[in-house]
Amino acid sequence: MRYAYPVIFTKTNDKKDTILIEVPDLEIHTEGFGVADSIEMARDAIGLSGITLEDMDLPIPQPSDIGEIDLAKSEFASGSESYISLVDVDFAKYRKKVDNKMVRKNVTIPNWLNKAAEKEKINVSKVLQEALMEKVGMAR
């Protein structure tokens, strides 16, 4: 699932080039330092919010049309320079990147197959991971 959300960036004009970030559709607030870092921080916040909603079996909100965003209603609209841009996130790729906690699973295979795998020095866990990733459409 790939979405592009409208994001409000507000410059603070401080020495660190801090940019305040708001994603209205997801009620997210964060900050970055400079434009490139701010875009990455927005992408990370959107990705984390999306996979958290998925884990809670809640729907991920659809992005608003960029033209529907009112800068005057921004949390940070206090006379500072603000602008809107789209930031895209592929939630499946984001999850694959950040959700790498290993989970132990018991697998039952025939003894003869286990002996053959051991003889060939095959890492059964790795083979299972690769097969599952291919099966669910996330092959490397």
Image: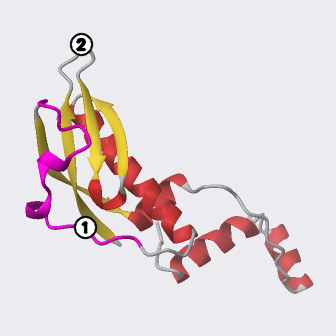
Of the pair 99 and 54, the residue shown nearer to us: 54
Does residue 137 show up magenta in the picture? no
Dominant SS in magenta: loop
Residue bearing mark 2: 15
The amino acid sitting under disc 2 is Lys
Please tell me which of labels 1 and 2 falls first in the chain: 2
Of the pair 127 and 75, the residue shown nearer to us: 75
Please give left or right for residue 75 compared with residue 61 in the image.
Answer: left
Quarter where residue 36 is shown: top left
Residue bearing mark 1: 63
Does residue 61 show up magenta in the picture? yes
Tell me the residue at 28%/67% (across/down): 3
Image x and y of residue 98, in percent: 52, 52
Q: Residues within 10 Å of mark 1 (few under 14, many from 20)?
A: some
Tell me the residue at 37%/55% (across/down): 46
Tell me the residue at 79%/71% (across/down): 105
Image x and y of residue 70, in percent: 12, 54
Image x and y of residue 77, in percent: 17, 38
Report the span colored magenta: 60-80
Q: Disc 1 and disc 2: Cα gap in Å?
A: 33 Å
Q: SS of the residue at dot 2?
A: loop
Quarter where residue 110 is shown: bottom right
Identify the mark at residue 108; answer none if there is no mark. Answer: none
Q: SS of the residue at dot 1?
A: loop
The amino acid sitting under disc 1 is Pro
Of the pair 112 and 93, the residue shown nearer to us: 93
Q: Image quadrant for the N terminus? A: bottom left
Please give left or right for residue 117 compared with residue 9 in the image.
Answer: right
Q: Residues within 10 Å of mark 2 (few under 14, many from 20)?
A: few
Image x and y of residue 13, in percent: 17, 20
